[in-house]
Image (tube, rainbow, N blue to C red):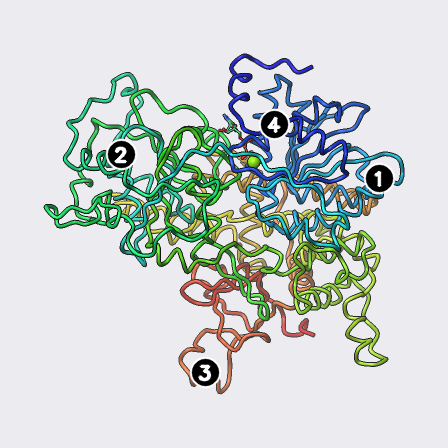
């Protein structure tokens, strides 16, 4: 029996999924696998694990496992469920890449999808679990897709062995045919249970004009208007990235300042403006769109707002319901109507993230500026207004060159509708789309599955380690292209993780052989490290010259995102600009120090990373040290944990090395630096670049540029790189990022005689 508090009881009863408990549990009992669809906020993530728990699925020493594509969700949902069930975190726990609070008493375990994939490697039958819930399946993250493929095999196996396991796939959209209608996945389609979303109607307002550049500015104006003119209710703004989120937070806080002491002062009633009155009068004639049965296409092409009669001649502005007029008095600070502005994005510290779930201080209006994380994985209470920029930042990979770039593109209609839906959870709401309905009509209907958009060498290695030799035959919900699979096998062969395919026989046989290379013992060792194959290779070579502790530190630093503060970020204000220049100079100086001199300089950017990790650990990895040194604290904490984890993994594969994490690691010797550079080359051998020379230099575009085997275009060493001044003849790089130019990141120098 679960002992829930009265408040929790009451809140639960309001969740639509609770009405379906019987139906869901009956379907679970009668079927090995089921699919549950329900709008975001209907209670799937927090309640379904509790249903299973109460039905006894956590008894007999087995657990209920729930996978999430995002770490944020795994952590925050485990806390939420623990709280709702009145159970300690030893019982309702989470595990993410290098962190968790799982104990031997854990009954409900939230984890990222990657964590469960690793567990399948250790125990293919997942015997610790009685049920697995794959959450947010609509996001189509790579690991989620793979897990569904694997579980479609594991569940029948468990049944055959007389220790049945249940699979529950949960999606926020109704588009689940890729799972249910896929004969290779499930021969008998699993039943689909739809949770009625009890979604309130959300009125969609399209912009007349679509700002092509300054949509952050547009979001600012729209938010100001909402706050000034519209009745109480939280505002949720969707932007694409962290920098945008912060810049909008700053502008809004400046426009509607809120100080802690203000909390008790009630919001002064403001005289309703003309605009407001008109707005109220006209809302009834606005199109009402019920998101439950809401066609993907807008009701009407053209400018709905005007057609719906909010237009106003007196004003000369036909887009009065918060239209696109930038030059208002909004920039003037107005402290009489404080706005409680919070950022929300995945790299944000957890304490900061948790703030969005708490009620805003009395007398203020909550305003959350978020990236995509707020689209489906987290439900923010009390949102009545959504402002949607219509865009999303995504990483793109060039299939041939591997060059990656972050690009801001239009989102899909399905995503835009998800975003709009956030406004109708507690009462009827409004969604302001900062683009025209014509532009919306051109959006793709759905976002593509991630697996079709990125390289897959890590997956291929993991699958080979699971003895799935012919990866092409794997029951992918959406299979990656053969071209991409071949490229992955080739890279793994070159890293020594797979055996060379035979070069004899007929062409067709050779083609097939390329897609079914068996795994090598080295490949198995590499698969046991929780990093991508290139980095796993570096770890596997690290034994030489006592380099292992350095290799571990460098690999940890290379695989954690964004460890350094961006020195090129623009100043946030006039007065900040001179301070920022000083800071830049100081941080540049510090990075130069970390890069070392002479021999160590040739390890380049990786030496800076090693220096940063060493210095940070030496200083005890404190937030203060990180702030002063231009390091992202959360990243440094991740690196610290990852070092511990990699150290354990290496010791497990190779106990005789007895490696340990030394908090007072001394810098590597000259010999060791040479050795480290060779190890790095072994992992990044296909990312070799040579300085442009000879006739190329006639063309000015090749000045100081590098040539790579795969690209025709020049690539460059970034001015912030340790090797910007040295410009060695040969370098290897971690990746090429296309920003203002094609820049190599994570550059290290290679000697000509090492180059094969
Ligand atoms: P779904 O998975 O269907 O999107 P959830 O189970 O995540 O729905 O959310 C159900 C409800 O629980 C939502 O109304 C949400 O606001 C609330 N909720 C979730 N997490 C928290 C939290 N940390 N604090 C307060 N309320 C929360
Ligand atoms: Mg959920």
Bin the neighbour count of mark 2 within 10 Å (Cα to Cα): few under 14, some 14-19, many 20 and up: many
Lateral position of residue 708 relative to residue 552, left or right: left
Q: Quadrant of residue 621?
A: top right
Q: Quadrant of residue 359?
A: top left
Using the numbered discs, state the Cα–Cα distance from disc 2 to disc 1 in whole angstroms: 55 Å
Residue at image mark 3:
697
Bin the neighbour count of mark 3 within 10 Å (Cα to Cα): few under 14, some 14-19, many 20 and up: few
Residue at image mark 2:
227
Secondary structure of the residue carrying tag 1 is: helix
Secondary structure of the residue carrying tag 2 is: helix
Residue at image mark 4:
47
Mark closer to the chain start, 3 or 4: 4
Would residue 661 be seen by someone viewing this image from the given angle? Answer: no
x and y, in percent, of residue 25 in the image: 70, 29
Using the numbered discs, state the Cα–Cα distance from disc 4 to disc 1 in whole angstroms: 25 Å
Picture layout, residue 487 above or below residue 173: below
Using the numbered discs, state the Cα–Cα distance from disc 3 to disc 4 in whole angstroms: 64 Å
Q: Which label lies toward us, 3 or 1? A: 1
The residue positioned farthest toward the left in the image shown: 314
x and y, in percent, of residue 182 in the image: 70, 54
Q: Which label lies toward us, 3 or 2? A: 2
Secondary structure of the residue carrying tag 4 is: helix
Dot label at residue 158: 1
At a point 81% along the width and 69% down the height, the residue shown is 500
């Amino acid at each position: 029996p679960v002992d829930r508090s009265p408040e929790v009881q009451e809140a639960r009863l309001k969740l639509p999924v609770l009405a379906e408990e019987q139906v869901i549990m009956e379907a679970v009992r009668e079927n090995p696998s089921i699919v549950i669809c329900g709008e975001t906020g209907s209670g799937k993530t927090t309640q379904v694990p509790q249903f299973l728990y109460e039905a006894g699925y956590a008894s007999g020493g087995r657990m209920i496992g729930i996978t999430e594509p995002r770490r944020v969700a795994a952590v925050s949902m485990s806390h939420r469920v623990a709280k709702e069930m009145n159970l300690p975190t030893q019982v309702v726990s989470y595990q993410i890449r290098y962190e968790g609070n799982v104990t031997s008493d854990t009954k409900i375990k939230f984890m990222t999808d990657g964590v469960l994939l690793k567990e399948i490697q250790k125990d293919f039958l997942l015997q610790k679990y009685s049920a697995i819930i794959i959450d947010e399946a609509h996001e189509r993250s790579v690991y989620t897709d793979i897990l569904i493929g694997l579980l479609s095999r594991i569940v029948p196996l468990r049944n055959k062995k007389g220790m049945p396991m249940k699979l529950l796939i949960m999606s926020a959209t109704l588009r689940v045919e890729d799972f249910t209608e896929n004969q290779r996945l499930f021969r008998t389609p699993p039943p689909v249970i739809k949770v009625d979303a009890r979604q309130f109607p959300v009125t969609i307002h399209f912009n007349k004009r679509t700002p092509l550049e300054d949509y952050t500015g547009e979001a600012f104006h729209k938010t100001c208007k909402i706050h000034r003119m519209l009745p109480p209710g939280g505002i949720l703004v969707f932007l694409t990235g962290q920098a945008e989120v912060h810049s909008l937070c700053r502008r809004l806080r400046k426009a509607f300042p809120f100080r802690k002491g203000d909390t008790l002062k009630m919001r002064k009633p403001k005289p309703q403006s003309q605009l407001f009155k008109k707005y109220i009068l006209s809302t009834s004639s606005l199109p009402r769109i019920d998101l439950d049965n809401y066609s993907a296409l807008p009701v009407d092409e053209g400018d709905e707002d005007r057609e719906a009669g909010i237009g106003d001649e007196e004003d000369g502005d036909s887009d009065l319901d918060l239209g696109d007029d930038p030059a208002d008095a909004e920039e003037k600070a107005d402290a009489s109507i404080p706005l409680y502005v919070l950022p929300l994005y995945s790299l944000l510290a957890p304490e900061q993230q948790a703030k969005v779930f708490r009620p805003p201080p009395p007398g203020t209006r909550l305003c959350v500026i978020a990236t995509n994380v707020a689209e489906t994985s987290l439900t923010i209470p009390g949102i009545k207004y959504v402002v949607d920029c219509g865009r999303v930042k995504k990483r793109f990979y060039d299939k041939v060159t591997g060059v990656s770039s972050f690009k801001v593109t239009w989102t899909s209609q399905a995503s835009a509708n998800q975003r709009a839906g956030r406004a109708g959870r507690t009462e009827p709401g409004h969604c302001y789309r900062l683009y025209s309905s014509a532009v919306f009509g051109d959006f793709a209907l759905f976002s593509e599955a991630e697996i079709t958009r990125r390289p897959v060498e890590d997956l291929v290695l993991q699958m080979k380690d699971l003895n799935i030799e012919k990866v092409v035959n794997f029951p992918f919900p959406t299979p990656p292209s053969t071209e991409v699979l071949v490229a992955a096998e080739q890279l793994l062969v070159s890293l020594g993780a797979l055996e060379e395919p035979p070069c004899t026989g007929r062409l067709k046989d050779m083609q097939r052989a390329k897609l079914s290379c068996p795994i090598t013992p080295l490949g198995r060792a590499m698969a046991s490290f929780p990093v991508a194959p290139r980095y796993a290779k570096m770890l596997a070579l690290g034994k030489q010259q006592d380099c292992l502790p350095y290799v571990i530190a460098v690999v940890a630093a290379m695989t954690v995102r964004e460890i350094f503060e961006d020195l090129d970020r623009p100043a946030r204000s006039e007065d900040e600009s001179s301070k920022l220049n000083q800071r830049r100079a100081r941080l540049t100086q510090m990075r130069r120090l970390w890069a070392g001199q002479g021999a160590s300089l040739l390890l380049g950017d990786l030496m800076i990373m090693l220096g940063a990790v060493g210095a940070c650990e030496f200083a005890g990895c404190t937030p203060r040290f990180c702030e002063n040194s231009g390091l992202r604290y959360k990243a440094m904490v991740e690196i610290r944990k990852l070092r511990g984890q990699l150290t354990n993994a290496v010791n497990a594969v190779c106990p005789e090395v007895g490696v340990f994490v030394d908090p007072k690691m001394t810098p590597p010797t000259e010999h060791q630096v040479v050795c480290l550079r060779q190890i790095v080359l072994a992992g990044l051998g296909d990312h070799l670049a040579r300085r442009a020379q000879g006739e190329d230099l006639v063309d000015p575009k090749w000045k100081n540029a590098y040539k790579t085997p795969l690209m025709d275009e020049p690539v460059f060493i970034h001015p912030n790189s340790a090797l910007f001044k040295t410009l060695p003849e040969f370098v290897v790089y971690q990746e090429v990022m296309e920003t203002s130019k094609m820049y190599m990141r994570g550059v290290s120098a290679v000697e000509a005689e090492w180059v094969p």
